[in-house]
Image (cartoon, helix red, strand yellow):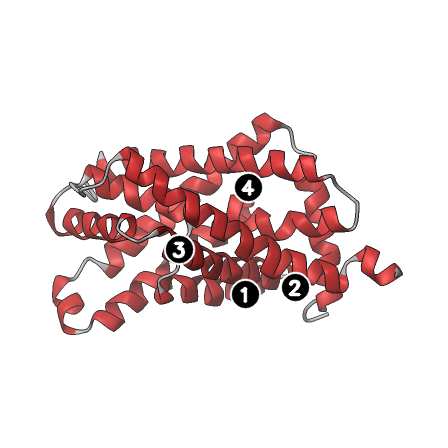
Amino acid sequence: MAFRTPAEIVASAEQAACSKTALSVPRVLVLGFLAGAYIGFGGLLAIVVGRGSPALLAANPGLAKFLFAAVFPVGIVMVVIAGSELFTGNCSVILPGCLCGRTSWASMLRNWVFAYVGNLLGSLFMAIFMAYLTGIVRGGGLGEATAGIAQAKVELDFWTLLLRGIGCNWLVGLGIWLALAADDVAGKILALWFPVMAFVAIGFEHSVANMFFIPLGMLNGAEASIGDFLLHLIPVTLGNIVGGSVMVGGIYGWLYGSRRAKS
């Protein structure tokens, strides 16, 4: 079989939902930490590649933006293939399991909360220890560019962030969804790359990625406080929940879920 049908994708999501909600809290935290770190690796690579040439950025900003977006998906590839708990991905995967009655809403919320906390810890670890203290993004051109990224993000208003969060996780959720359709590693990588590259190039907002970008920008002089960072995360996170759980997991779970098939 070259790929799974939409109904088979939903069946895979329902099974994944059962596995994810059965994890203990310590395991979700550790796997969440790994997912945050992996997204941080993608963010760090994107900064180095996409902001590493000021001349290219000045001469062809569209190409520089594409390069930034093109390498960022390495993080979510590691999340899916190596195995970890990414809050934004779980928004789209777990809901179908709740809709068909195979897992509980309380279990879904528990997974989301502790995956989110783990993602935050992993992202902060990457920003502080792997990007800043290593000197890779500490001052200089990359530091200035990262501060600019963070500054631009925290200056956006609530509704803009909410809508950009919806658009982001609609695409990320579709990337996870398409990856469920593939049985081989190459197919999963391609399925993930296109939607994730698209959300970054478009300029949508991903809560876990911003857990890396904004603190790293703050370390490099961005005029943003911890309060600004947290206030930024609220609408983006809410938008990510809607984009992943409603626009992907909810709609496809309703259309093709096992409970729907019996009705």
- Reading the image, the residue beneath label 4 is 85
Asked whether the viewer can see residue 178, the reply is yes
The N terminus lies in quadrant: bottom right
Do residues under tags 2 and 4 come within 8 Å of each other at their CB atoms? no
State which mark lies toward you, 2 or 3: 3
- Counting labels gives 4
* Horizontal relation, residue 218 to residue 46: left or right: left
Q: Label 4's element?
A: loop
- Reading the image, the residue beneath label 2 is 181
Judge the density around disc 3: few (<14), some (14-19), many (≥20) Cα neighbours within 10 Å.
few
Do residues under tags 1 and 2 come within 8 Å of each other at their CB atoms? yes
Residue at figure coordinates x 49%, y 54% from the top left: 77
The circle on residue 159 is 3
The circle on residue 191 is 1
Query: N-terminal of the two: label 4 or label 3?
Result: 4
Q: Position of residue 94 (x, y in %)?
A: 66, 47
Query: N-terminal of the two: label 4 or label 1?
Result: 4
Judge the density around disc 4: few (<14), some (14-19), many (≥20) Cα neighbours within 10 Å.
many
**Residue type marked 1:** Ala
Query: N-terminal of the two: label 3 or label 1?
Result: 3
Q: Position of residue 161 (x, y in %)?
A: 38, 54
Query: N-terminal of the two: label 1 or label 2?
Result: 2
